[in-house]
Amino acid sequence: MNWALIRSGRWLKGWTRLWLFDLGCASFLGVAMLGLVMALGLPLLLPDNAERKVDTLILLMNMFVASACVAIAWQLNRLSATEWATLVPQYRQSVLLQALSLLLITIITAVGFLLAHDALDKTAELLLTLLFSFGFLYLSLTTSNAFYLSFLLYISLPMYPYLVGLLPQGASFLLLFAVLVLAVILWQKLMRLGWNSRARSVYLNGLEMGWFWLPSPQSFKLLNRLERSLHPANYFIGPVFSIMLFAMPLFTLSLALIAHYMGYQVPVLSLLVQFNCILCGMLHWSRIQRWRAVESLFVLPGFDGKQGMIEAFMKAQYRLLAILTISMVITASLVSLLNPAINLSIWLHIVLTTLFGCGLTLGLGSMCRTSLQISGLIFLIGILSGWVSAGLASVESGEQVWHMVRWDLLFTLLSFVMLWFAKRRLWRGDLLRL
């Protein structure tokens, strides 16, 4: 540790360009800041003495912590891919100190949030978030390809309360000990961090293929047909998109079966609604990340000018919306066989929420032109999560939610209006001026 460097403050030079102007890192930090802002602002909007309020706020704070850790992993992977890092004096130490400062500020903020809301009983959830985040950091340092699994860190966040419920009394001390041990191991690993030839390919594949390596989709006829039907909407994100369209319903059904036979109540359909919206957001996030690829897409045969390319992109989005809705219809129907409390009104509520939630995400995403704007869609996903949860909360009491279904129909109409308007905003004023 170079204490002279720390005391001089020179290690802070260039941190804005490194952390805020790198689109990948800025996007993750944007999600983290949005989670923090929502966690700080929602108490002013939600009613007092609501148990659900505390659970929602802790989920947002855990998202803040996890997103900060993913941003750090992005920078560490980029550092490993930088061949000249050892040639610039104190560059490597400065990046590590900046990452450590961000991590400490994140943890202090999260702990202060628990103290401010008198929610120390939720400490185990925060420790579990840190444990999984540190584990993700260690795997990213050990195997660069592990960064492709960053999306698992996000979709696992709503499951932490249920995992904590399975732990015995006093498990917080064990989690704290595990976090501290893993932190020491991480620090030792960072002290030996060097150049990694694979890290560069991970960084480039993150921009080209959505941080996920897959065999060629031509190897699977069904995937190949799906790829063609979604083109050019999936051009920027790569084969990971089609794989996740298949994988998430299967994962949801597997989780529902496990929860059913173990006697646990897990809101699997709520998780699937959230992930479908996140998947639609990722489609436009990748489009913005790879803004230079718009010209490459335009020169491909099959488009009648710029307007023809926009028409094809929007039609592909409508096909995607139909696929996601049909997938939810089938998945929700199968899950309802395991849970008879899911009545027709709740089933319609879930399906329609998927329809208008994904439609709004695609519509608003088409209007976005910066990574900060697309990160703002996390607000919409958070609201949708609460909307679905409000309907699923009535499952236990066997209530009907027809009043929510009427609102769902209105929101569905709004989403199609948004998609129609998005057609006029997509790539407006961008590189293409044809």
Image (spheres, rainbow, N blue to C red):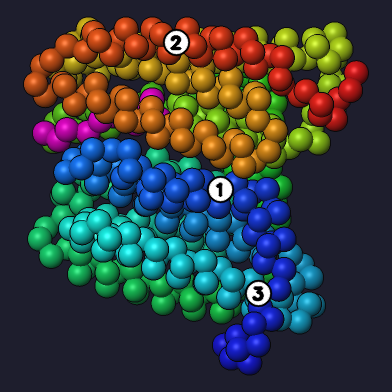
Q: Which labelled disc corresponds to residue 12?
A: 3
Tell me: residue 314, above or below residue 59.
above
Cα–Cα span, label 2 and label 3: 48 Å
Residue 337 placement, left or right of 272: left
Q: Residue under label 2, please give it.
A: 412
The amino acid sitting under disc 3 is Leu
**Which residue appears at 46% of the width and 35% of the height?**
379
Q: Quadrant of residue 250?
A: top left
Give how far across and how far down residue 266 sits, in percent: 22, 33
Q: Secondary structure at mark 1?
A: helix
Q: Residue under label 1, please give it.
A: 30
Tell me: residue 213, above or below residue 363.
below
Asked if the residue at tag 1 contacts the one at tag 3, i.e. Cβ–Cβ closer than 8 Å, the answer is no
| Disc nearer the start of the sequence (2/1) | 1
Give how far across and how far down residue 256 sits, in percent: 24, 28
Give how far across and how far down residue 433 sits, in percent: 89, 23
Residue 260 placement, left or right of 136: left
Q: Quadrant of residue 231?
A: top right
The magenta-colored residue range is 263-274
The amino acid sitting under disc 2 is Thr
Tell me: residue 373, above or below residue 342.
below
**Which residue appears at 72% of the width and 68% of the height?**
14
The amino acid sitting under disc 1 is Gly
